[in-house]
Amino acid sequence: MGPVSESGPAGGWGRFALAAYGPTTLSSVGHGAIAPLVALSALDLGASVQLSAMVAGLAAIGQLLGDLPASWVATRLGDKRAIVVACLWDAAFLTVACLSRSLPLLAVAVLCFGPAGAVFGLARQSYITESAPAAVRARALSTLGGAFRFGAFLGPLAGAAIIDRWSLSAAYGFAAGMSLLAAGLTLTLPDLPGERVRPGQRPDEAKLWPVLRHYHKVYLRLGTGVMILSLARSCRQVILPLWCAAQGFTAQSTSLVYAVSMAIDTSLFFLGGLIMDRHGRRWVAVPSMIVLGLGLAGLSLAHHPAAVVVMAAVLGLGNGVGAGLVMVLGSDASPAVGRPQFLSGWRLMSDVGNTLAPVAISALVALTASLGLAAVGLGAVVGLGAAWLGSGIPRRSPPPPGGGSA
């Protein structure tokens, strides 16, 4: 399968879309189905509320631990095989979770979801970066972000139906099946462009730590802004249901508010990619973060149900238009030689932001003794992050194909 051009990829857009987005959508549906259920599974196995929350957070910790080793897997196996191995690993531990009858075994299974996600995410991003030229890179990566959001939106609906028909543990079996389907779909495809070694390039030419050291200024300039963006996105997912609960919303009403936010979020991915390709990355990066910051701060003033829905919609707008932004900026900055190593460091910074979200909210609530003031504080941090990220994005965007070299 050849690279993508403005007129379409060599094998046709349908084949390219199947290769690039099919496994992501399937995997996201599976993990979306179990995302709300891990804490409930831990409770069923005798864990306290606090311990259940810790078990649910183990997947994020596992992904952090897997971000840097993922480059080793992707370099040696190639993108296609790395995706297959990640899906099979994922399916194996989802099956363990499905069959688990003890809390320690469930915790180990959840922790092992993380490295699979790290390898899968790195390989799929590397594939798109290799396949799509700079002129359409943002649209290609934003569509990848949209595929993830679409799957995450459908997943909880599928999970609810499965639990109603069978049991909670059956949802893990469903997720394992989705990962196996993703692996099977990947196996039917031709070798991905990222697997073809360029003349004179050997996998051992680029080492992880030299690449990370060489690009430390890029990580500081752009990576810090991306970390704050990821923090804002994760805070939105945590603080919105907490604010709904503080306003006396029922669980069903909270779910509807969240669904409104997700519906807007899921519908805007291509618009953001189009703007980035035609006008530059800043025109999405800065407005997206500003809108997220305003949405977080605005929650402190939302005491009526209609106002809460409006703020949820604002948060969905800010997050949705920036779909794929983290991947786009990382792919723009990544070198032609050492791309997996660079992207592993990039994804680590993003995942640190994701993981810090609950800690940041807890710390701000403790300092201010108010969820509303904590939301304002988060909005201010995101606003500063917008200024930092905007100043670091190169004015010439997108860059020439191939990036730099280590």
Image (cartoon, rainbow, N blue to C red):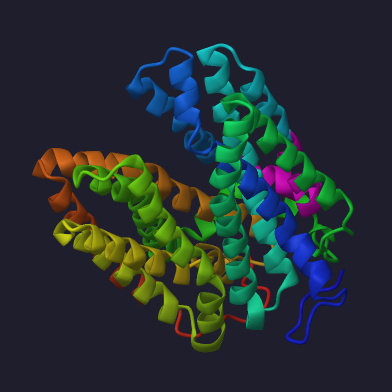
The residue at the point 76 percent across, 82 percent down is 5
- Tell me residue 102's x, y (percent): 55, 11
Q: Is residue 370 left or right of residue 24?
A: left
Instruction: Give the residues in magenta.
Output: 67-88
Front residue of this view, candidates 38 and 186:
38
The answer to whether one can see residue 338 in this image is no
User: Residue at the spot x=29%, y=48% of the render?
Assistant: 239
73 part of magenta stretch: yes
**5 and 46: which one is in front?**
46
The image shows residue 69 at horizontal and vertical percentages of 62, 40
Q: Residue at x 65, y 39 (%)?
A: 116
Residue 187 image position (x, y, % from top left): 86, 49
Quarter of the image for the N terminus: give it: bottom right
Q: Residue 144: which quarter of the image?
A: bottom right
Up/down of 73 relative to 226, above or below: above
The C terminus sits in image quarter = bottom right
Q: Tell whether 159 sits left or right of 202.
A: left
Count of numbered labels shown in the rendering: 0
Residue placed at 50% from the left, 32% from the top? 37
- Predominant SS of the magenta segment: helix
Q: In this view, does 357 lie to the left or right of 125?
A: left
- Is residue 141 rendered magenta in the image? no
Q: Can residue 180 be seen in this view?
A: yes
Could you say which quadrant of the image residue 183 lies in?
top right
Q: What is the x, y in percent for residue 147?
A: 62, 60
